[in-house]
Image (tube, helix red, strand yellow):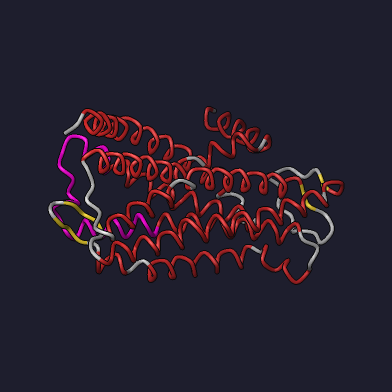
Amino acid sequence: MTALSSLLFLLQANIYQYAAPIIFGFGIIGNIFIIIMFVRRRQNSCAIYLLMAAVVNTINTTFNFTTTIYTLNHSDPGNSILVFCKLRYYFIHVWGQLARYFAIFACIDRYAVATTNTRLCWIARPCVAWKMIIAMIIIWHILASHLLIFVTINNGRCGQFGLYYIVFEIYYLIFVCVIPPVSMMIFGFLAYRKLRHLHGRIMPVSINTHSKPSKNKIHRRDRDLLIMVLGEVVFYVMTMSGYPFIVLETAVTNYMGITKSIDHIAIETFFTMIAILLLYLNYSAPFYIYIVASKTFRRDFKALLIRLWH
Protein backbone atom coordinates (compact mmCIF):
# COMPACT_ATOMS: atom_id res chain seq x y z
CA MET A 1 0.00 0.00 0.00
CA THR A 2 1.44 3.37 -1.05
CA ALA A 3 1.64 6.50 1.07
CA LEU A 4 -1.18 8.16 -0.90
CA SER A 5 -3.57 5.22 -0.56
CA SER A 6 -2.77 4.90 3.16
CA LEU A 7 -3.48 8.59 3.69
CA LEU A 8 -6.78 8.46 1.78
CA PHE A 9 -8.00 5.36 3.62
CA LEU A 10 -7.09 7.01 6.94
CA LEU A 11 -8.95 10.19 5.98
CA GLN A 12 -11.94 8.17 4.85
CA ALA A 13 -12.07 6.26 8.14
CA ASN A 14 -11.84 9.45 10.22
CA ILE A 15 -14.44 11.30 8.18
CA TYR A 16 -16.82 8.36 8.41
CA GLN A 17 -16.20 7.97 12.13
CA TYR A 18 -16.67 11.61 13.14
CA ALA A 19 -18.51 13.48 10.36
CA ALA A 20 -21.26 10.95 9.61
CA PRO A 21 -22.62 10.67 13.19
CA ILE A 22 -22.60 14.47 13.53
CA ILE A 23 -24.45 14.95 10.23
CA PHE A 24 -27.07 12.32 11.07
CA GLY A 25 -27.43 13.49 14.67
CA PHE A 26 -28.11 17.11 13.73
CA GLY A 27 -30.37 15.86 10.93
CA ILE A 28 -32.58 13.95 13.36
CA ILE A 29 -32.94 17.01 15.61
CA GLY A 30 -33.66 19.36 12.70
CA ASN A 31 -36.24 17.11 11.04
CA ILE A 32 -38.07 16.59 14.33
CA PHE A 33 -38.38 20.37 14.69
CA ILE A 34 -39.76 20.60 11.14
CA ILE A 35 -42.37 17.96 11.98
CA ILE A 36 -43.39 19.80 15.15
CA MET A 37 -43.69 23.13 13.32
CA PHE A 38 -45.50 21.86 10.22
CA VAL A 39 -47.81 19.25 11.73
CA ARG A 40 -50.25 22.03 12.68
CA ARG A 41 -50.24 23.44 9.15
CA ARG A 42 -51.78 20.53 7.32
CA GLN A 43 -54.20 22.87 5.52
CA ASN A 44 -51.33 24.08 3.36
CA SER A 45 -50.36 21.70 0.55
CA CYS A 46 -46.70 22.78 0.39
CA ALA A 47 -46.34 22.40 4.16
CA ILE A 48 -47.74 18.86 3.80
CA TYR A 49 -45.01 17.94 1.29
CA LEU A 50 -42.30 19.44 3.50
CA LEU A 51 -43.80 17.70 6.55
CA MET A 52 -43.78 14.28 4.87
CA ALA A 53 -40.27 14.87 3.54
CA ALA A 54 -39.18 15.60 7.12
CA VAL A 55 -40.87 12.39 8.32
CA VAL A 56 -39.02 10.15 5.83
CA ASN A 57 -35.80 12.11 6.41
CA THR A 58 -36.14 11.48 10.14
CA ILE A 59 -36.58 7.76 9.55
CA ASN A 60 -33.67 7.71 7.11
CA THR A 61 -31.24 9.68 9.28
CA THR A 62 -32.19 7.69 12.39
CA PHE A 63 -31.51 4.42 10.60
CA ASN A 64 -28.22 5.70 9.16
CA PHE A 65 -27.18 7.14 12.53
CA THR A 66 -27.91 3.85 14.32
CA THR A 67 -26.06 1.68 11.79
CA THR A 68 -23.13 4.11 11.62
CA ILE A 69 -22.68 4.14 15.40
CA TYR A 70 -22.95 0.35 15.54
CA THR A 71 -20.40 -0.29 12.78
CA LEU A 72 -17.82 1.98 14.45
CA ASN A 73 -17.19 -0.71 17.07
CA HIS A 74 -18.61 -3.82 15.40
CA SER A 75 -18.48 -5.50 12.02
CA ASP A 76 -21.09 -4.33 9.52
CA PRO A 77 -24.01 -6.82 9.64
CA GLY A 78 -24.87 -5.90 6.05
CA ASN A 79 -21.70 -7.63 4.88
CA SER A 80 -22.65 -10.96 6.44
CA ILE A 81 -26.47 -11.07 6.71
CA LEU A 82 -28.04 -11.16 3.24
CA VAL A 83 -31.55 -10.13 4.34
CA PHE A 84 -30.21 -7.08 6.18
CA CYS A 85 -28.00 -6.23 3.19
CA LYS A 86 -30.97 -6.21 0.80
CA LEU A 87 -33.39 -4.42 3.15
CA ARG A 88 -30.88 -1.69 4.05
CA TYR A 89 -30.23 -0.82 0.42
CA TYR A 90 -33.94 -1.01 -0.38
CA PHE A 91 -35.33 1.17 2.41
CA ILE A 92 -32.56 3.79 2.34
CA HIS A 93 -33.15 4.20 -1.39
CA VAL A 94 -36.95 4.33 -1.05
CA TRP A 95 -36.85 6.87 1.80
CA GLY A 96 -34.33 9.02 -0.06
CA GLN A 97 -36.40 8.99 -3.24
CA LEU A 98 -39.59 9.87 -1.38
CA ALA A 99 -37.92 12.91 0.19
CA ARG A 100 -36.57 14.05 -3.20
CA TYR A 101 -39.86 13.66 -5.02
CA PHE A 102 -41.81 15.33 -2.22
CA ALA A 103 -39.47 18.29 -2.76
CA ILE A 104 -40.30 18.20 -6.49
CA PHE A 105 -44.00 18.30 -5.69
CA ALA A 106 -43.38 21.20 -3.30
CA CYS A 107 -41.80 23.12 -6.21
CA ILE A 108 -44.76 22.28 -8.47
CA ASP A 109 -47.12 23.33 -5.70
CA ARG A 110 -45.40 26.71 -5.33
CA TYR A 111 -45.66 27.27 -9.07
CA ALA A 112 -49.36 26.40 -8.95
CA VAL A 113 -49.87 28.92 -6.13
CA ALA A 114 -47.98 31.68 -7.93
CA THR A 115 -49.48 31.17 -11.38
CA THR A 116 -52.60 32.99 -12.57
CA ASN A 117 -53.71 29.92 -14.52
CA THR A 118 -56.88 28.79 -12.78
CA ARG A 119 -56.57 25.31 -14.29
CA LEU A 120 -53.45 24.71 -12.18
CA CYS A 121 -54.84 26.01 -8.89
CA TRP A 122 -56.34 22.61 -8.05
CA ILE A 123 -52.80 21.27 -7.60
CA ALA A 124 -52.29 23.47 -4.53
CA ARG A 125 -54.94 21.68 -2.46
CA PRO A 126 -54.28 19.56 0.63
CA CYS A 127 -56.43 16.67 -0.65
CA VAL A 128 -54.36 16.56 -3.86
CA ALA A 129 -51.13 16.66 -1.84
CA TRP A 130 -52.16 13.66 0.26
CA LYS A 131 -53.15 11.69 -2.85
CA MET A 132 -49.80 12.44 -4.51
CA ILE A 133 -47.93 11.43 -1.35
CA ILE A 134 -49.77 8.10 -1.12
CA ALA A 135 -49.18 7.48 -4.83
CA MET A 136 -45.44 8.20 -4.49
CA ILE A 137 -45.12 5.88 -1.49
CA ILE A 138 -46.69 3.03 -3.46
CA ILE A 139 -44.78 3.77 -6.67
CA TRP A 140 -41.33 3.92 -5.11
CA HIS A 141 -41.82 0.80 -3.03
CA ILE A 142 -42.58 -0.98 -6.31
CA LEU A 143 -39.93 0.70 -8.49
CA ALA A 144 -37.14 -0.02 -6.00
CA SER A 145 -38.06 -3.70 -5.63
CA HIS A 146 -35.19 -4.70 -7.96
CA LEU A 147 -32.84 -3.95 -5.05
CA LEU A 148 -34.44 -6.75 -3.06
CA ILE A 149 -33.69 -9.15 -5.91
CA PHE A 150 -30.26 -8.23 -7.23
CA VAL A 151 -28.38 -6.67 -4.31
CA THR A 152 -26.21 -9.37 -2.76
CA ILE A 153 -23.06 -10.06 -0.76
CA ASN A 154 -19.86 -10.74 -2.69
CA ASN A 155 -16.46 -11.32 -1.07
CA GLY A 156 -17.78 -10.02 2.25
CA ARG A 157 -19.21 -6.81 0.75
CA CYS A 158 -22.86 -5.85 0.30
CA GLY A 159 -23.72 -4.13 -2.95
CA GLN A 160 -24.37 -4.42 -6.69
CA PHE A 161 -22.10 -6.56 -8.85
CA GLY A 162 -21.64 -7.59 -12.46
CA LEU A 163 -24.07 -6.31 -15.09
CA TYR A 164 -26.53 -5.15 -12.43
CA TYR A 165 -23.92 -2.68 -11.16
CA ILE A 166 -23.94 -0.91 -14.56
CA VAL A 167 -27.75 -1.06 -14.82
CA PHE A 168 -28.18 0.30 -11.29
CA GLU A 169 -25.78 3.19 -11.86
CA ILE A 170 -27.66 4.20 -15.02
CA TYR A 171 -30.95 3.95 -13.11
CA TYR A 172 -29.47 5.97 -10.24
CA LEU A 173 -28.17 8.69 -12.56
CA ILE A 174 -31.59 9.06 -14.18
CA PHE A 175 -33.87 8.95 -11.13
CA VAL A 176 -31.56 10.61 -8.59
CA CYS A 177 -29.07 12.80 -10.45
CA VAL A 178 -31.13 13.98 -13.45
CA ILE A 179 -34.90 13.97 -12.89
CA PRO A 180 -35.00 15.48 -9.35
CA PRO A 181 -32.62 18.44 -9.88
CA VAL A 182 -33.91 19.24 -13.38
CA SER A 183 -37.55 19.13 -12.21
CA MET A 184 -36.76 21.18 -9.11
CA MET A 185 -34.89 23.81 -11.12
CA ILE A 186 -37.58 24.08 -13.80
CA PHE A 187 -40.54 24.48 -11.47
CA GLY A 188 -38.50 26.45 -8.93
CA PHE A 189 -37.49 28.93 -11.63
CA LEU A 190 -41.06 29.20 -12.95
CA ALA A 191 -42.39 29.78 -9.42
CA TYR A 192 -39.66 32.36 -8.71
CA ARG A 193 -40.45 34.22 -11.94
CA LYS A 194 -44.15 34.28 -11.07
CA LEU A 195 -43.27 35.45 -7.57
CA ARG A 196 -41.29 38.37 -8.98
CA HIS A 197 -44.25 39.24 -11.19
CA LEU A 198 -46.61 39.20 -8.22
CA HIS A 199 -44.16 40.88 -5.83
CA GLY A 200 -46.19 44.06 -5.69
CA ARG A 201 -49.31 42.13 -4.74
CA ILE A 202 -48.03 40.24 -1.71
CA MET A 203 -50.43 40.16 1.23
CA PRO A 204 -48.70 40.35 4.65
CA VAL A 205 -50.37 37.29 6.16
CA SER A 206 -48.63 35.41 8.99
CA ILE A 207 -46.99 32.12 8.10
CA ASN A 208 -49.21 30.42 10.64
CA THR A 209 -52.43 31.67 9.04
CA HIS A 210 -54.32 29.30 6.75
CA SER A 211 -55.92 30.72 3.64
CA LYS A 212 -56.69 29.54 0.15
CA PRO A 213 -54.42 30.49 -2.75
CA SER A 214 -55.68 33.48 -4.65
CA LYS A 215 -55.73 33.85 -8.38
CA ASN A 216 -54.14 37.31 -8.30
CA LYS A 217 -52.35 37.52 -4.96
CA ILE A 218 -49.71 35.50 -3.17
CA HIS A 219 -49.61 35.59 0.60
CA ARG A 220 -46.39 36.22 2.49
CA ARG A 221 -46.69 32.73 3.96
CA ASP A 222 -46.65 31.26 0.45
CA ARG A 223 -43.71 33.44 -0.55
CA ASP A 224 -41.71 32.27 2.48
CA LEU A 225 -42.50 28.65 1.70
CA LEU A 226 -41.28 29.20 -1.86
CA ILE A 227 -38.03 30.73 -0.60
CA MET A 228 -37.51 27.76 1.72
CA VAL A 229 -38.14 25.29 -1.10
CA LEU A 230 -35.82 27.17 -3.46
CA GLY A 231 -33.08 27.10 -0.82
CA GLU A 232 -33.49 23.34 -0.57
CA VAL A 233 -33.31 23.03 -4.37
CA VAL A 234 -30.08 25.03 -4.58
CA PHE A 235 -28.52 22.95 -1.82
CA TYR A 236 -29.54 19.69 -3.48
CA VAL A 237 -28.09 20.70 -6.84
CA MET A 238 -24.82 21.79 -5.21
CA THR A 239 -24.35 18.64 -3.14
CA MET A 240 -25.17 16.10 -5.86
CA SER A 241 -23.43 17.77 -8.81
CA GLY A 242 -20.18 15.82 -8.42
CA TYR A 243 -21.72 12.39 -7.88
CA PRO A 244 -22.63 11.63 -11.55
CA PHE A 245 -19.06 12.19 -12.72
CA ILE A 246 -17.61 9.91 -10.05
CA VAL A 247 -20.19 7.21 -10.81
CA LEU A 248 -19.59 7.40 -14.57
CA GLU A 249 -15.81 7.20 -14.18
CA THR A 250 -16.03 4.21 -11.85
CA ALA A 251 -18.67 2.38 -13.88
CA VAL A 252 -16.95 2.91 -17.25
CA THR A 253 -13.50 1.87 -16.03
CA ASN A 254 -14.92 -1.20 -14.29
CA TYR A 255 -16.94 -2.19 -17.37
CA MET A 256 -13.89 -1.79 -19.65
CA GLY A 257 -11.88 -4.02 -17.35
CA ILE A 258 -9.11 -1.47 -16.85
CA THR A 259 -6.49 -2.59 -14.35
CA LYS A 260 -6.42 -0.05 -11.55
CA SER A 261 -3.54 0.69 -9.25
CA ILE A 262 -3.96 0.80 -5.49
CA ASP A 263 -3.81 4.61 -5.60
CA HIS A 264 -6.50 4.70 -8.31
CA ILE A 265 -8.83 2.52 -6.24
CA ALA A 266 -8.12 4.59 -3.11
CA ILE A 267 -8.91 7.84 -4.92
CA GLU A 268 -12.16 6.42 -6.36
CA THR A 269 -13.22 5.06 -2.98
CA PHE A 270 -12.43 8.31 -1.19
CA PHE A 271 -14.30 10.59 -3.59
CA THR A 272 -17.23 8.17 -3.78
CA MET A 273 -17.50 8.29 0.01
CA ILE A 274 -17.39 12.12 -0.03
CA ALA A 275 -20.06 12.27 -2.77
CA ILE A 276 -22.35 9.88 -0.86
CA LEU A 277 -21.84 11.84 2.35
CA LEU A 278 -22.84 15.03 0.51
CA LEU A 279 -25.98 13.29 -0.74
CA TYR A 280 -26.77 12.27 2.84
CA LEU A 281 -26.54 15.94 3.81
CA ASN A 282 -29.81 16.45 1.93
CA TYR A 283 -31.59 14.30 4.52
CA SER A 284 -30.20 16.39 7.39
CA ALA A 285 -30.02 19.94 6.06
CA PRO A 286 -33.63 21.12 5.37
CA PHE A 287 -34.25 22.56 8.85
CA TYR A 288 -31.03 24.60 8.76
CA ILE A 289 -31.77 25.74 5.19
CA TYR A 290 -35.19 26.97 6.32
CA ILE A 291 -33.65 28.79 9.28
CA VAL A 292 -31.23 30.65 7.00
CA ALA A 293 -33.71 31.30 4.18
CA SER A 294 -36.84 32.47 6.02
CA LYS A 295 -37.13 35.18 8.64
CA THR A 296 -40.68 34.05 9.39
CA PHE A 297 -39.52 30.48 9.96
CA ARG A 298 -36.90 31.76 12.39
CA ARG A 299 -39.53 33.75 14.25
CA ASP A 300 -41.87 30.77 14.45
CA PHE A 301 -39.03 28.52 15.62
CA LYS A 302 -38.13 31.01 18.34
CA ALA A 303 -41.77 31.06 19.45
CA LEU A 304 -41.76 27.25 19.48
CA LEU A 305 -38.69 27.17 21.73
CA ILE A 306 -40.29 29.63 24.12
CA ARG A 307 -43.45 27.48 24.31
CA LEU A 308 -41.38 24.35 24.89
CA TRP A 309 -39.38 26.11 27.60
CA HIS A 310 -42.52 27.10 29.44
Q: Quadrant of residue 86?
A: bottom left
Up-down: is 117 above or below 33? below
Highlighted magenta segment, given as a residue range = 67-94
- Left or right: 145 with respect to 156? right
**Nearer-the-camera pick, 229 or 265:** 265
Q: Residue at x 78, y 52 (%)?
A: 218
Q: Residue at x 55, y 31 (%)?
A: 305
**Nearer-the-camera pick, 230 or 271:** 271
Q: Residue at x 58, y 29 (%)?
A: 306
**What x and y, as percent, mark residue 94?**
39, 60
> Which quadrant is home to the N terminus?
top left
**What x and y, as percent, mark residue 81?**
15, 55
> Which quadrant is home to the C terminus?
top right
Up-down: is 52 above or below 287? below
Asked if residue 181 lies in the magenta stretch, the reply is no
Magenta residues, dominant SS class: helix
- Left or right: 204 with respect to 260? right
Q: Quadrant of residue 228?
A: top right
Count the numbered circles shown: 0
**What x and y, as percent, mark residue 239?**
48, 43
- Left or right: 63 with respect to 115? left
Q: Quadrant of residue 113?
A: bottom right
